Amino acid sequence: MSTYREIIGKKIKKVSSDPSSGLDGEMWYNSTTGTLRGRAIIEAWVSTSPMSSPRATMAGGGTNTSAITTGKNGANPSDAAFAESYNGTGWANETNVPTALGYASGTGSSSEAYVQIGGGYPSKTGTVLDYDGSSWTSATAVPGGGPGYIEAGAAGPSADALVAGGNNGETTTWERGGGSWTSGGAMASGVYAPTLVGTQTAAISMGGVTYPGGYKDYNQDYNGTAWTSLTVLPSIRGYSGGAGIQTLSMIIGGGAPGSPGLLAACLKWDGSSWTSIANLGTARNTMCPMGKTIGTAVATPGNQTPAGTEEYNSSTTAYTAAAWASGGAMGTARYAISGVGTQTAALGAMGYTPSGKPASWKYTEEYNGSTWSEQTDMSTARFSGGAFGVQTSAIFAGGNLDPGYSDAVEEYNGSSWTNVTSLPAVRKAAPGFGVETAGVVCGGNLPAATDTSLEYNGSSWTAGGTMPTTGGGENSGSGILTAGLFVVGATTPPAVGATYEYNGSAWTAGGTTLDSSESRAVSSAGTQASSIIFGGDPQKNTTGGYDGTSWSTRPSLATGRSRLGGAGTATAGLAFGGKTTAVSTATEEFTGETTAANIGTFTTS
């Protein structure tokens, strides 16, 4: 018998505590616990960022780091033009499909070429559209409208796609190569809504539906010429997701008889038999298949799961999804509040309160990562001001006096406020970014909306670069003076959803938020190259993330709110106060996705 060292090339070392890292296959003996330890494979689904809008009956393809979906509910063809891509963290809008097709199929990925095939409602169509990551091109249609206009399966790379099945139990197969379509072998069993994965010459079709007849347990593979029936599924299902290759694939959730008829169960096929694997967190159907290996897959929303997405990983790495969690409540409910600092050392000041005004508009609170504590009041009562800095060294500038606007600037040193050089003119709703000795306030109202920005050096204000647009109220800012970010929530004229980047002297256009309405009355945290915005008017719970180029979704707040305070970073953010149906004291903490080695105990018997 070979030894572990002969097989792996490493010795089993004796240690008193588990190492913080290690290579796959590496093992050690923990002398403290008296156990053999090593990195163990974990299979799990983890909830991740939602799609930008709820949808089902989509076409799609890709992997858990490069996926794309098109379409929505096929009964509403005007909704079927949507396209979104997934980058492993969140969803981003893509160029809309020029011809809205419900019940279509798709294959490929967002980083490669993607193709949408067939679809159409209420009439059958074999339309084929190619996508190169920025634009759509009409391609040779599937002859005769394709194998079926509702729920034909698709697999393979986009240039060599395979489609099979259809609404009326068609057994027809079509293969794409060199831009044209040719007829392939007939399916062993006709079906629609099958889960089809693999390639044109090595595909597998799992489950599906016939009408009449209902859900099926069919399992059949294709070798490029003919289909062959295989060991059937342990239970009937259709409208499932899928991932993998012909000889190592998985079928994800789906529909089944009964009420509500949704499945969370997932199964793995190894080329000869079926085994159960980790269930979805939420049962769902009408998902599009995504994943080239069974170790990496994405389950898109589907019916009854409005926007939620789950990601599957089978590896020695344990994933903890990004999420918002409840934090300590503020002492005073308020909105239009300004904030600076970090998740564990934040400062919130100003803010509108319906009662106790204007005295309560001076209130100052500090957050230590778990609780808020009252501090010395500001000198001037106001709300909707600009702010930058950290908890122990911050500048709060301008604001709304109701009536009138303020030019007052106050400096906070961690215990008390001091009046410092005023703004050149009164200004409200001008977001800020930077540190106390190198900060910016930009946009806002003078009282008219303005395109000016101001820089502060710790003692005086000077004119900064002119913005590409006038920035009225409801905007947000993050970053530092030489790398700042301005997200437009309201302007004159409107350019809501636009993003502008500042380099310390000039502004340039950045990416556009996923939904223009989600950038109104939001708060933000982070840097120019890594930022999040959250909340929005009217009382949104959405979160968007910016990577320095484009925006994609992040997990949503537990409670929708607008005009809230924010602090922290894109992976450790803080949301507090704001307006829901009432004025809020609630705090939520955001933590980005984390990973860790999955270390387990192995038996020695």
Image (tube, rainbow, N blue to C red):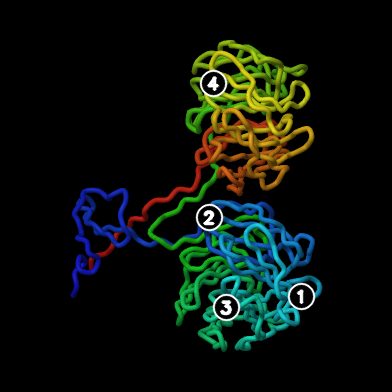
> What residue type is disc 4 on?
Ala
Dot 2 or dot 1, earlier in sequence:
2
| Quarter of the rendering containing residue 539 | top right
| Number of callouts | 4
In percent of width and height, residue 300 lies at: 61, 61
Q: Which residue carries the number 4 mark?
A: 394
How dense is the environment of label 1, judged by Cα within 10 Å: few (below 14), some, or many (20 and up)?
A: many
Q: Is residue 294 visible?
A: yes
Residue 4 in the figure: left or right of residue 502: left
Residue 71 located left or right of residue 10: right
Q: Amino acid at mark 2?
A: Gly
Q: Looking at the image, is 305 positioned above or below residue 346?
A: below
Tell me how far mark 2 sits from mark 3, CA to CA.
26 Å
Q: Amino acid at mark 1?
A: Thr
Q: Nearer the viewer, residue 376 or 520?
A: 520
Whole-angstrom CA distance, mark 2 to mark 1, is 32 Å
152 lies above or below 528: below
Q: Position of residue 12 (x, y in %)?
A: 20, 59
Residue shown at 64% from the left, 20% from the top: 463
Going from N to C along the chain, the mark reached first, 4 or 1, is: 1
* Gap in angstroms between the C-alphas marked 3 and 4: 60 Å
Residue pictured at 20% horizontal, 68% vertical: 6
C-beta proximity under 8 Å, tags 3 and 4: no
Which numbered marker is on residue 197? none
Q: Look at mark 2 in the image and give the residue it sits on.
A: 88
Label 4 element class: strand
Residue 136 is situated, as x and y percent measured from the top left of the image, at 69, 63
Q: Which residue is mark 1?
A: 125
At mark 2, the secondary structure is loop
Q: Nearer the viewer, mark 4 or mark 1?
A: 1
Q: Which residue is mark 3?
A: 206
- Give x and y (percent) for residue 198: 53, 75
